[in-house]
Amino acid sequence: MTQPAGKQLALQWQCITNAHNGDNFIAELTLSNRSAAPLAGSGWAIYFNTCRKIKPEGIEGGVQIEQVNGDLWRMVPAAGFGTLAAGESRLIRYEGLFWVIQETDAPLGFYIVYGDGTPQARAEAIGDPVILPFVTEGQRHRNANDKVPLVTPATRFADNEKLTLLAPEAVGKITPTPLEASFGGGQFVIDGSTAIVHPDALNAEAALLQAALADVGVAAQRAAAGKGIVLQLGTVNVAQTGAAGEAYSLEIGADGIVITGASAHGVFNGIQSLRQLLPVDAFVNPLPALAVPFGRVVDAPRFAYRGLHLDVGRNFSSKQSVLRLLECMALYKLNQFHFHLTDDEGWRLEIPTLPELTEIGSGRGYTATETDHLVPCFGSGAEVEGSSGTGFYSRADFIEILRFATARHIEIVPEFDVPGHARSAIKAMNVRYERLKAAGQLEAAEQYLLTDFADKSEYESVQLWHDNVICIAREGAYNFIETVITDVKSMYAEAGAPWTTLHTGGDEVPHGAWEASPICQAFMQQHGMTTIQELQDHFLGRYRDILKKHGLTFGGWEEIALKKETVDGVVHHGPNPKFVDANFRPYIWNNIWGWGQEDFAYQLANAGYQVVLCNVTNLYFDLAYEKDPVEPGYYWGGFINTRKAFEFCPLDIYTTATLNLFGHELGDSLKNSARLTEQGVKNVIGIQGELWAENIRDAGRLEYLAMPRLVALAERAWAKDPGWTFVADKAVRDARMDADWNQFANRLGQRELPRLDGLVGGYGYRVPVPGATVDGGKLLANVEAPGFVLRYTTDGSEPTNASAQYTGPVAVSGTVRLAAFTTTGRRGRVVSVG
């Protein structure tokens, strides 16, 4: 019988309400048959991804919905489905756990499988549903406790009213803000006659400067002696000692430019500051001669570790996207790239000794067995090729990335996530095992096996997986770790890149893992262990020994340094004293206001751990910028706009903490939270922004989420402690913060984002969304990055570069549509008022 093709089926999805039966939601999915053939009442299944658990009972529409694993769900016709005739639609109503208030919450990646579970099974893509608008209070708020206001053009306008457009000469010229900078009235012109003078030790830095000048139109030449732009190594006297080797001075006068660095890295930092003094327009419209102001800069970073994390496990980002991100990091003097290369949903780096890791673990698509690739996740769909869920870096790709980063003084910290978040590796090694076992090579088959096939442990990870934890009592786990490290180490060596730290993940091991594993239980009994904590500590200790042998620091999420103790049925968390040493580095993310672990980073630092702060409330760049249903990103840790990143105070995170996750005043709830001791301050080695990839399905989304928050991250990681940290008087503190934010917002609007319009072909940063209101028949508008051009229409059409420019209050009638535009004419999101 003829069946509708996947593309002949259409879907529409809508949140009906939240706060149903407590913290549940009701949603409706409309399935429409646009073919000439009926959809039968049996013989098919529709698969899709959603991060919200669906309750199997009470589903309306004649279907059953069941979880496959992780975020993959299957919808099949129930006994009463009948047929879906040509041209007809079927309304399917279901209840799910928690809430859906953003388009990001909608199910994605639908595909239909005919003959599901048979050798003749055929999968056909349907695609993503049309998502209907969120318009009611019940759709827009999580529950009655949700006091976080919806962001509208009017609320944006009110928030932006404290901002003023500064004169260009009043806007800081260099970002991140240098320790000392002064500029005079004269200018030095850089043109084709300008020589880049440098010793051989600075060949790489000189080459990058020459290329950077060429990008803005200047054909400078390199020389061993003379005047022009002199690059040299020497002593730089600075008070800031976070990373003295990165200190530099930059002097510009009538005779030329001199950049002195305490090391080659310091010289590189000085070059980035010189680039920022070039006319911003030149990055979009290159010129053969460019003037920079006379002046002097003496500078060094506050923190030695200034990082950005990119997840390519959940969704893959191309090599070119990674190189573009590294280029932007370099401009803003970020020096650590935490490369999250593996997760449950994908293994992204070729390991020549274990080819199954990328053969099986780097692809996602429809599969009944996962012996060919992994199942779809995050809406990646039925097809393997061309999917955001598919891809990996070859050995040659990774070496190229390493060399690119090393030239820009960025160290790559790779992450291979174990013992949880390891499903892609587990499935790949299962395939290897079965192949070798079938060939009669049982010993070789078990060499890298990560599974206890008799394990009956019941658990569910945060991402809803039930089989994502490796068997840490198998010797294969340690053989696997050793082999991956050895192969990766050879890549660093060939690239000539430094490798000091391996990030091991270590996070979110679900409760219940290993408890019913015969292998683990036998191992525990053999070694006198009585708790799972002891087994996990054993794993961490062996892993640390492997890394120590390779000269690597053991990095991991905060859970690696966490000790759980149950007292009177209550679980308590605290620093684990077993691993306090210089070769054990926790990265701390969980400080969600109101969750009770806000001070864990400070506890660890005070206990002697060297920590990297990755606070979700300020530095998780995959979270939505604002509470607007169309704004992409999750919000489980809050809504994180650029100002949130800018306001982050590493040594006093409580300074800007006023509201909890649901918008309620914190009051004095943090008064007993740990503060940093004198030694604890020394143990905060830096900060890092996080970019998780659940919602990054293309390169444009990556840059949208990363920028401009990345620029604010760089400011906080490099510049000295802002003047409002530790200020007890809230009114004084807020006034200072507002003034500093106004300066930084002007830098974004007048200098940094216009520069990014032209750098490496232009970045797809988030264009600020206008604030606007109509008052007394007049349009009032503003933008959070002063300097952007606003254009509007009053005839219902979308504004273009030819539309009227907003320059001040103007009489309007009817509906006004308004948007901000970049210097290259790229339009941001359109808003409507009136």
Image: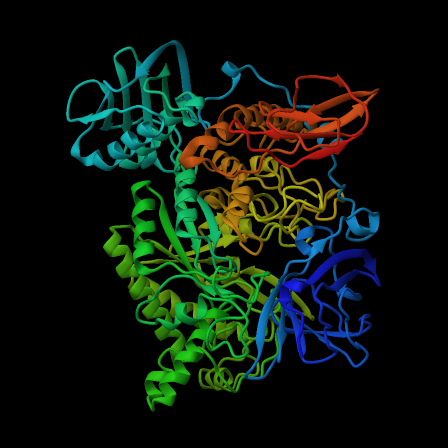
Q: How is the image coloured?
A: rainbow
Viewer-closest of 671 and 823: 823
Label count reads 0
- Which residue ends up furthest to the top in the rendered image? 185
Viewer-closest of 603 and 215: 215
Residue 36 lies left or right of residue 800; in this view the side is right
Query: In the image, what residue occupies the spot 42% across and 54% down?
Result: 339
Residue 304 lies left or right of residue 791; in this view the side is left
Query: In the image, what residue occupies the spot 54% across and 49% down?
Result: 602
Q: Quadrant of residue 744?
A: top right
Q: At which x and y percent is residue 134?
A: 77, 48
Residue 308 sits above or below residue 467 on the image: above
Q: Quadrant of the N terminus?
A: bottom right
Residue 414 sits above or below residue 147 on the image: below
Residue 748 sits above or below residue 170 on the image: below
Query: In the image, what residue occupies the spot 42% across and 27% down?
Result: 283
Q: At which x and y percent is residue 331?
A: 40, 34
Q: Quadrant of the C terminus?
A: top right
Q: At which x and y percent is residue 763?
A: 48, 37
Query: In the image, what residue occupies the spot 80% across and 53% down?
Result: 143
Inspect this view and state whether residue 461 appears: no
Inspect this view and state whether residue 482 appears: yes
Q: At which x and y percent is residue 631?
A: 66, 44
Residue 122 lies left or right of residue 196; in this view the side is right
- Which residue ends up furthest to the front in the rendered image? 36
